[in-house]
Amino acid sequence: MAELLAIEGLQAGYGATEILRGIDLAVNENEIVAVLGSNGAGKSTLNRAISGVLPPWRGTIRFEGKAIERARPSAIVAQGLIHVPEGRRIFPNMTVAENLDLGCYARARARRAENRARVFGIFPRLAERQAQSAGTLSGGEQQMLAIGRGLMAEPKLLILDEPSLGLSPKLVEELFALIQRINAQGIALLLVEQNVMQSLEVARRAYVLDNGAIVLQGSAADVRDDPDLKRAYLGM
């Protein structure tokens, strides 16, 4: 598989506080890669640096071989690297359909209708509620909408930041099944999660982030099956 995202020596932080301390990470085409860690490990900071919201201090970020560590967020989106942030960030007073359409504002606008139909095929509940105000959706439906909005931009790589946060166990099961369906359509995913075991069930490879550094990496199966490593870094 060809390498899609390559990060080397990434350092970033806020003010004088360093959060990321030399991150090396890669995502290949068509694979799911999990980034796992507890609150405060640096996961959201990593996502912000990749998507251009937080300029890195040092290191390189390459997407399809092109350096993007100094690119604007809009330029990164235009290349097909799409970030679905933690907390859903939908527009509650707009309809489901209007929220989806915003997803293709910077990319794939000409194929808006086709991509909306594709999203409705993945998330039938959104099709049923397309004229409904987004703020009236359940938490699970709002998460579907946030992911659907990301899919409207025809991502080559979709970053999902804590997608299972706040969902019931039943909805979490449904969410991870949908993540696999999205990947089956040829979309690579960087799954940044605290939900360790279910992330490892769907991912091909995994990285464990602790105190801003990668402390463990390997196949998802190896990470899942090593009790000492899970106890040390994942609190399990």
Image (cartoon, grey):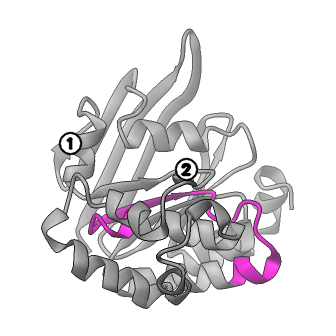
Residue behind mark 2: 89
**Res 169 → quadrant:** bottom right
Tell me if 7 is positioned left or right of 44 in this view.
left
Residue 166 among those drawn in magenta: yes
Spot the residue most to the left.
Answer: 110
Q: Position of residue 20 (x, y in %)?
A: 54, 31
Q: How many marks?
A: 2
Q: Is residue 33 visible?
A: no
Q: Is residue 18 visible?
A: yes
**Res 129 → quadrant:** bottom right
Give neighbour class at mark 1: few <14, some 14-19, many 20+ (Cα, 10 Å).
Answer: some
Above or below residue 152? Residue 5 is above
Residue behind mark 1: 75
Element carrying mark 1: helix
Residue nearest the viewer, comparing 136 with 17 = 136
The answer for how far apart the CA atoms under marks 1 and 2 are is 20 Å
Q: Which residues are magenta?
A: 150-173
Above or below residue 227? Residue 82 is above
